[in-house]
Amino acid sequence: MKKFKRIVSLVCVSCLLISSVVGCGSKVEDKSKDSVTKKEDTVKKDEAVELRFSWWGGEARHEGTLAVIDAYMAKNPNVKIEAEYSGWDGYYQKLVTQLAGTTAPDVIQINYNWLHDLRRQGKFFTDPRDMKDIIDVSGFSQASLDAISVDGELQGLPTGLNAVGMIYNKEFFEKNNLPQDIEYWNWDNLIEEGKRVHEADANQYLLNEFPKTLVDLSNMYLEQKGKEIVTKDFTVGVNVEELTEVYEYIQKLFDNGVIPPFEESALFQDKTEQYPKWINGEMGMFIQVASVIPALSGNFDVGVTRVPLMDGAKSSGVSINATNIFAINDNGPNKEEAAKLINFMLNEEEGINILKDVRGVQSTENGRKLLLDAGAINPVISQTIDIASKYPGQANNEAEMNSELNDIKLQYIEKLGYGELSPEEAATEMLEVIEEKLEEIKKN
C-alpha cells in the first residue's frame, strides 16, 4: 500500500513538473509571437510603397501639387509618389482607357460632370466613408458631398468648391440706396428695386444676366417651387403653365429695365469683366459663380449676397459644385496609402497651406478659415461658398448636366429674350422639343 502511495505521489509530481514545463514553454512561445508581430508591424510600416497620382491643370496647380507630394514623402520616407500630370486635353480619354484596363493611378483627379458616366461603366472609386479610420469626412458640408455622389455612393472628396451668389458693386449699391443685407432679396423686390434704379437713370441696370445665366435663373426659380424641367430619371418635370410662369418672370425683368436687352448684353457673354456697363459702374450685380469674383473686382469693391428666395422655398436652387475631386482607385493596390495622402492634402494644416487655392476655394470650413487667416484666398469668394452652404439647393442630377438638354433650354431663352416668342409660346415649344430629345436619349 505504501509502495502504491509512493507511485501515485511520483505520478502527481511528474504531472506538475510536466505542466510547469509546458506552461513555461507556452509563455515563451507567446512572447516570441508578440515579438514577431511587433517586428512585422514595423516592417509593414517601413515597407516601401509606390503610389501613382494623376491630375490636370496649369503651372500653378502643378507646382502646388508637386510641393505637397514632396512634403508627404518627407513625412513618410517609405512612400514614393509618381506624379502623372498634364493639361486638360486628352486627360479624360486616357483615364477612361486606364480604368477599363485596370491600369489607372492610385489617386485620381476627376471632374464632377464625369461621375455619372464613369459610374455606369463600372465601380471604379472607393467611397471615402468606407475608410473613415483614415480619411476624416466630417469637415465637408453635406451639400458638397451630395454633389459628388451617385446613387448614394460618394465617388471621392471635393478638392475645392464653387457656387453661385449675387455679386454686387458696393459703390453702385450705396449710390442707389440699395440694401447690402445678405438676406434681403426676393423675386418681387428684385423687380421693384430694379425698376426704381432704371427709372432714376436709364443708363443703369440693377442686374445683368446673359442668355446662359438666365437658364440657371429659370432652373433656380423652379427648384424653389420644388420643380425641375427634367427629372433625374430623364422625364419632364413641369407642365406648360409652370414653365410659362418662369418665362413671364424673365419677361418682366426685360420690360421693367431690371436687366439690359440681349442685343447689348449677349455680346459679353462669358466676358463679364469686359462689359462696359460693369466697368463704368452702371451695372449693380450679377448672379454668378464665385470663381469669377477676382475678374469682376478690378475697378471697385464687390460684395456678395444670397440669391432671391420666394416665401416657402423648397430650397435655394443653388448647387455647390466641386471644382475637382480626388478619388481613390477601387482596384488599386495601395488604397490605404492613397487615402492617407488625400487626408494630408485636404484635412491636415500642412497640406492645406501648401495647396492653397490651386484647385479652387478649399472644400472644408476649417481649411477656408486657415487660408483666410493667412490672406491666401479672396474673402468674398469664401463668403460666397459659406452663403451657398447655409442656403443649399439640390445637387445637380445627371439630366441637368446633359449638354443637349441644356442647349435646348438656352435656345428658347434666347428666343424669348430676342422677342421671337411669347412666354407661353416658348414654354410650349420647348417642352415639345425636350420630350423628343428625351425619347432619343432613352433609345440610345
Image (cartoon, rainbow, N blue to C red):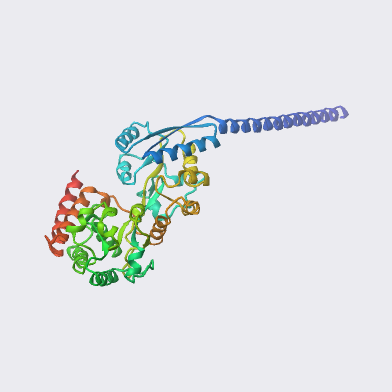
Q: Quadrant of residue 33?
A: top right
Image position of 353 with respect to 255: above or below: above
Instruction: Please tell me which residue lies in front, 123 or 299.
Output: 299
Residue 384's x, y, as percent? 39, 58
Q: How many marks?
A: 0
Image position of 341 with respect to 260: above or below: above
Residue reaching furthest left? 420
Residue reaching furthest right? 2
Instruction: Please tell me which residue lies in front, 205 or 249.
Output: 205
Q: Is residue 287 left or right of residue 409?
A: right
Res. 107 visible in picture: yes
Residue 262's x, y, as percent? 18, 59
Residue drawn at point x = 21 percent, y = 57 percent: 265
Residue drawn at point x = 36 percent, y = 48 percent: 323
Res. 232 visible in picture: no
Q: Is residue 436 left or right of residue 283?
A: left
Residue 75's x, y, as percent? 55, 37
Instruction: Please tell me which residue lies in front, 325 or 184.
Output: 184
Residue 312's x, y, as percent? 33, 69
Quarter of the image with the C terminus in it? top left
Quarter of the image with the N terminus in it? top right
Instruction: Please tell me which residue lies in front, 288 or 347.
Output: 288
Image position of 151 with respect to 419: above or below: above
